[in-house]
Amino acid sequence: MLEIKNISKTFNPGTVNAKTALNGLNLTLEDGDFVTVIGGNGAGKSTMLNAIAGCWKVDEGSILIDGINITHMPEYKRAKFLGRVFQDPMMGTAADMQIDENLAIAARRGKHHTFKWGVSSKERAEYRELLKQLDLGLENRLTSKVGLLSGGQRQAVTLLMASLNQPKLLLLDEHTAALDPKTAAKVLEITDRIVNENKLTTIMITHNMRDAIKHGNRLIMMHEGRVIVDVKGEDKKKLTVEDLLGMFTKASGSEFASDRAMLSK
Amino acid sequence: MFLNWLATLPGAIAQGIIWGIMAVGVYITYKILDIADLTVDGSICTGAAVCAVMVTSGVNVWVAMICAVLAGMLTGLATGLLHTLMGIPPILAGILTQLILWSVNLKIMGKANIALPSRQFDVILAQLNIKQSLIWLVVFVAVIVALLYFFFGTELGMSLRSTGNNIHMSQAQGININFTKVLGLVISNGIVALSGALLAQYQGFSDINMGRGAIVIGLAAVIIGETLFSKIARNFAVRLLAVVAGGIIYFFVYQTVIFLGLDTDLLKMLSAVVVAIFLAVPYWKKKYFTKVKIKPTTESKSEEVKENA
């Protein structure tokens, strides 16, 4: 489904600030995989998602989705394969536009924008149903500006947007990190439901080890721009936080270096 | 005295509508695309120049106006390409096009100004016939607002709005933001050039200097319209009409201060100062008058909860 072959990325090459964020990263995902990603600060987790999304070009290696080489495709073109939710709830939605307009833009992801009306009434009815399933009371606020919603509501709407138009791959970049614990749990619950219902192949970055263990069918741990631990199937179901910390120390030869992750185990 | 003042009003309204149309163009870039486009100082004159040259050489005034709009669109395209293709920041791209247009406008006209007397040529607007001018201007405003209202409700128009609103989101949703930015600049400058063509007819000449400071008048109209009508202007069409109304009010005040005997040399400075103050008000409001909410503490609290969890 997704094949990442030996990609590398160095930011600010040739300067004192040079930082190798991805260092010969390899990862292959099967159809329907729901992979959680953990790793210390600067391990390359977000960089990997940005490489897939095409925020910049990778230095070497290639990225394929369903056999299509997207390594050199501009960001807006590969967007049709991808659904994305960012850490910052403000980033995934257009604040000054209505909820239905945001959803309609997402529903047209990867399609040609024409002079057809931007949101049809048929779509509005669909969106109302989908919003009702979020159980956040948004179904009656279709024409509210997204900027009026809370962070959690905005993340939920962004998730819904990302799932419209059946993306081949869903990229979740610590999408609950900026939310309070209760809201974060709710958004994770919605995430699970949306992923399962649409059978989406998903990569979810989290700094919370328990979440990483609880969700998905596969867990990878990254360190210095590479995958150092890859657990799937039955093994993943039996994982504990202590196991993970042990695996990390063994694979990387160092202590797990994320204060945030340590605190939230 | 009062009657004399009253007599200047229809003229102020006509000029106000013409500049209000120009301000609608500014609204598209400044408010919708979030780009301060300085091309307009040049493109308004391009519109006037093309219209004046064509009409004085015997071309039908409607054909001349269409050509003026197309020329204006090209100026927007130039700025758009300078920005997207060559990576120049939008403000600088606008300034560069503006400078290019100074030469281009001189070449179009062949000299610094061209007279377009309404007695001699078949034009639709004229200072001598304010009533007819006003009727035509109202028609123009209605058509432009209707077209824009329709356009910004379409898929394409929505992609333009989202580009100005949230670039990250737009790219993640597969919108080619370079295309939408260029498109917005093209539409905006087409409208600005149309207002230039109307202005040349109304005042009876086209002049190389007529666009100087146009962006400030445009911004003034946008800001006045927004400030005065923000309560009622929810609907997009009403907001555009509010911008036109802002242009009328600007010229209303302008005529009044001239009438009261203010030194006209100072007018441009006053306009700029007024715009500067209005632009500063939202910033000051945010900085000094925001009620200190306990929000930061609740956030740090939830941080703690998260860490303890």
Image (cartoon, helix red, strand yellow):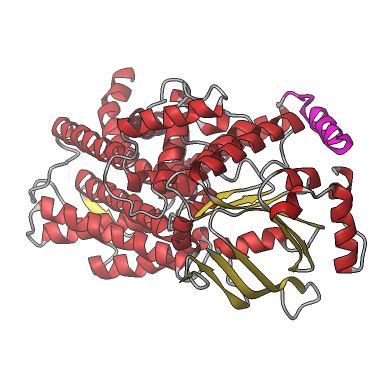
Picture quadrant of residue B296: top right
In this view, the residue farthest toward the front is A234
Query: Residue drawn 67% across and 75% down?
Result: A8
In this view, the residue farthest toward the bottom is A14
- Magenta residue check for B300: yes
**In the depicted structure, whether residue A158 falls above or below residue B207:** above
Depth order, front residue of A14/A71:
A71
Give the magenta part as a residue range: B291-309
Residue B268 shows in the view:
no
Is B45 displayed left or right of B64 in the figure? Answer: right
Is B221 displayed left or right of B169 in the figure? Answer: left
Residue A234's x, y, as percent? 72, 52
Query: Residue drawn 89% across and 35% down?
Result: B308
- Magenta residue check for B215: no
Depth order, front residue of A42/B134:
A42
Picture quadrant of residue A105: top left
Residue B104's x, y, as percent? 31, 69
Depth order, front residue of B132/A229:
A229
Residue A181's x, y, as percent? 76, 33
Depth order, front residue of A203/B110:
A203
Residue B96's x, y, as percent? 45, 66
Is B302 displayed left or right of A124 in the figure? Answer: right
**In the depicted structure, whether residue A265 falls above or below residue A128:** below
**In the depicted structure, whether residue A39 falls above or below residue B261:** below
Q: In which quarter of the image is the N terminus of chain B?
A: top left
Query: Residue drawn 57% across and 69% down?
Result: A3
